[in-house]
Structure formats: C-alpha cells, structure tokens
Image (tube, rainbow, N blue to C red):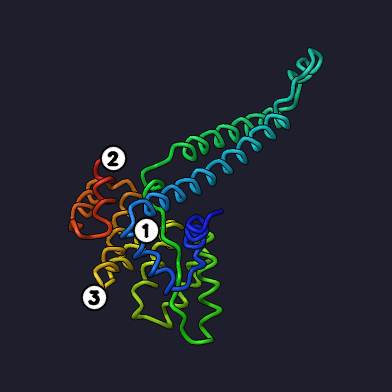
C-alpha cells in the first residue's frame, strides 16, 4: 500500500485528526488525480459491501432450498400427497420466504441513485473537553462503521451538549436519514445557519439526498439546481440532475 492509498484509507475510516482532515480535503480540492483516486476507493468500498450482502443472500437462498425443497424419491412424492395440511402450509411459507429474499436481492443488486450519491464523508470531530472525548470517539466509530442507529443516539447526546455545532447537527441528520427518520433529518439540515458556506452547502446537499431517498424527484431537482458554480457540491448536483 503506497502512501497516497494509506492516506485515502485513513480518511475514509475517519482516523484522521481534524487538522489532518482539513489539510487532506484542501489537497483533494487542488489535485484532480487525488480526487479521482478517492472516488475510486469509495466506489470500491460500495461494491465490496454489496458483494458481501449478495454472497450472504445466496447462502440464505441455498439454505432455504436445502431445508424446504430437497430432491425426493417417487415414494417421497407419494408421501407428500398424503402429508397433513399444516405441512403443506409450511411449504407455502417457505416459498413465500424465498420470494421475499429474491425481492430483497433485486433491491440490493439494483444500485439506486441514492446509493450512488450518498457516500458520506467520515466523521472527524474537533476534540472538546476530556469528558467529551470518549463520547466523540464512540460517535465517530459508530458513524464511520455505518452503525447509524448507535451513531444517532451518540450524536444526539453530543449535540445537546454543543447545540451551536452545525457540523454535529448535519451528521446527526445523516444518521437519522439512514435509519429512515426522514422528516427529523430534514428538520436538522434546514436548521443549519453556519457562516461557512461549505457547511451550509453540506447541509443543503444532504437535504437533496433526503428527497432522493424518498423518491421525490421534483423537490430533489429543485434543490440540486440551487448550488452555485463555486460550491464544492455543484459538480455532484449536475451529475445527479443528468441521471434523474
């Protein structure tokens, strides 16, 4: 692993300090080749995650087939014609379970626009007091590991202690969005009033994603068109508009 790859992996794992992250993101904005390499790493992680889910699903389907649809002899077929009603019902339930898994497979393997664009930057919090550091570490670990329910609870606690921290507010909104609490997430994104335009645009981009997640393409397009050309999210928004 070369130095550039190691730095990208460290960034995506949320293991950089706030200062390191700021320097690295500045370098990304100034180096097109590094930006492309970062995107390749993100796409590869998404591919590997989907591959693992696919393999797990295939194993589940094979297990259902083995348990409920074994190959039988002619005598076995005759016996099945005489089996009690409750066993026939069990077979029907097994078929239903298989169909449910196949439907799940369809959604897993059909990468949605949301999956393509909702690649969240890792959470790296500015260290506060010693009493907050452990909570911050747990929140970063949970969020960057995509354990969003756990991250939601931890970020909510941090935000109550730091109510003026808009970055915390956005990441809490992302966690809520990922666990399906869309309205709560949108409310948090719209509360952001930071003076830093990059933070405001970060909130706006996630508001766009929230409408993309729920399939409201009209509202999604409207918000995506509002990014100015100098916004770090302008290019992403244009790509999204072309794909919608």
Quarter of the image for residue 84 reads top right
* Residue depicted at 31% across the width and 63% down the height: 202
Position of residue 237 measured from the top left corner of the image (x, y, whole percent): 26, 51
User: What is the number of the mark on residue 45?
Assistant: none
1 or 3: tag closer to the N-terminus: 1
**Secondary structure beneath disc 1?**
helix
* Residue depicted at 33% across the width and 52% down the height: 32
- Relative side of 103 to 30, left or right: right
Mark 2 crowd level (few <14, some 14–19, many ≥20, 10 Å Cα): few
**Secondary structure beneath disc 3?**
loop
Mark 1 crowd level (few <14, some 14–19, many ≥20, 10 Å Cα): many
- Asked whether 149 or 242 is in front, the reply is 242
**Secondary structure beneath disc 2?**
helix
- Residue farthest to the top? 74
Position of residue 6 measured from the top left corner of the image (x, y, whole percent): 52, 58
Q: Which residue is mark 1?
A: 182
User: What is the number of the mark on residue 243?
Assistant: 2
Disc 1 versus disc 3: distance between alpha carbons?
A: 25 Å
């Amino acid at each position: 692993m070369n130095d550039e790859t190691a730095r990208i992996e460290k960034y995506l794992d949320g293991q950089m300090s706030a200062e390191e992250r700021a320097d690295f993101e500045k370098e990304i904005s100034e180096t097109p080749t590094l930006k492309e390499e970062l995107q390749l790493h993100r796409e590869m992680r998404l591919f590997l995650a989907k591959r693992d889910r696919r393999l797990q699903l295939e194993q589940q389907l094979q297990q259902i087939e083995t348990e409920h649809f074994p190959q039988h002899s002619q005598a076995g077929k005759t016996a099945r014609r005489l089996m009690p009603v409750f066993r026939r019902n069990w077979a029907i339930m097994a078929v239903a379970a298989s169909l449910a898994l196949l439907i799940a497979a369809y959604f897993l393997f059909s990468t949605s626009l949301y999956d393509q664009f909702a690649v969240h930057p890792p959470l790296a919090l500015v260290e506060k007091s010693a009493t907050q550091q452990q909570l911050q570490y747990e929140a970063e670990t949970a969020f960057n590991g995509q354990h969003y329910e756990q991250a939601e609870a931890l970020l909510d606690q941090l935000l109550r202690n730091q109510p003026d921290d808009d970055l915390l507010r956005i990441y809490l909104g992302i966690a809520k969005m990922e666990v399906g609490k869309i309205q709560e997430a949108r409310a948090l994104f719209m509360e952001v009033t930071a003076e830093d335009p990059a933070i405001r645009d970060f909130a706006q981009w996630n508001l766009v994603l929230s409408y993309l997640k729920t399939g409201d393409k009209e509202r999604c397009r409207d918000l995506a068109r509002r990014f100015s050309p100098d916004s770090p999210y302008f290019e992403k928004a244009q790509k999204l508009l072309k794909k919608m």
